[in-house]
Amino acid sequence: MRAALDEARAALATGDVPIGAVVLDAGGAVLATGRNVREAEHDPTGHAEVVALRAAARTLGEWRLEGCTLVVTLEPCTMCAGAAVLSRVDRVVFGAHDDKAGAVGSLWDVVRDRRLNHRPEVRAGVLAEESSALLAEFFRGHRGPASGA
């Protein structure tokens, strides 16, 4: 999670929401990293998880990421939770819950939907306070004190 937090901090330089992700291989080594690049690349799918999953697939030369773990600072949205399922990662580990858009238990639970053919294991709340603080600081700077954020 510390590597994912480093990626999240790097996203700040481009004005992107500070969310970072890493994909670990079965032995726990970092295969790929990603950070939000929606602003930097003008890409609506430029979420940290998608960036990291794509990079991991390129590294392995295989779209099936069986045995891998996706680690991300914020609970994945529906798109990213779906990408985790479709990539066949074994587990999803995340920091802060996202009550507004989270799809790994908060608002939806895409990854544990019994109708799907793959359901990764989930571990939530890893370094959640640090992840939440980074996001709160970012939004405080973008919304200002009058917004109530």
Image: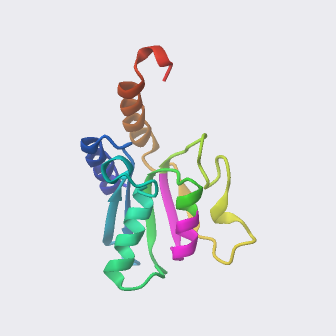
With respect to residue 115, does 77 lie above or below? above
Residue name at image x 52 percent, y 51 percent: 75
Report whether 111 appears left or right of 136: right
Name the quadrant containing residue 138.
top left
Residue 103: % across, % down: 61, 54
Residue name at image x 56 percent, y 74 percent: 86
Looking at this view, name the residue that lies furthest to the right.
115
Residue name at image x 39 percent, y 78 percent: 57
With respect to residue 17, does 59 lie above or below? below
Residue 31: % across, % down: 32, 73
Query: Magenta segment: does it hold 43?
Result: no
Q: What stretch is highlighted in magenta?
A: 82-94
Looking at this view, name the residue that lies furthest to the front.
42
With respect to residue 62, does 110 lie above or below? above
Residue 26: % across, % down: 41, 78
- Quarter of the picture holding the N terminus: bottom left
Residue 32: % across, % down: 32, 69
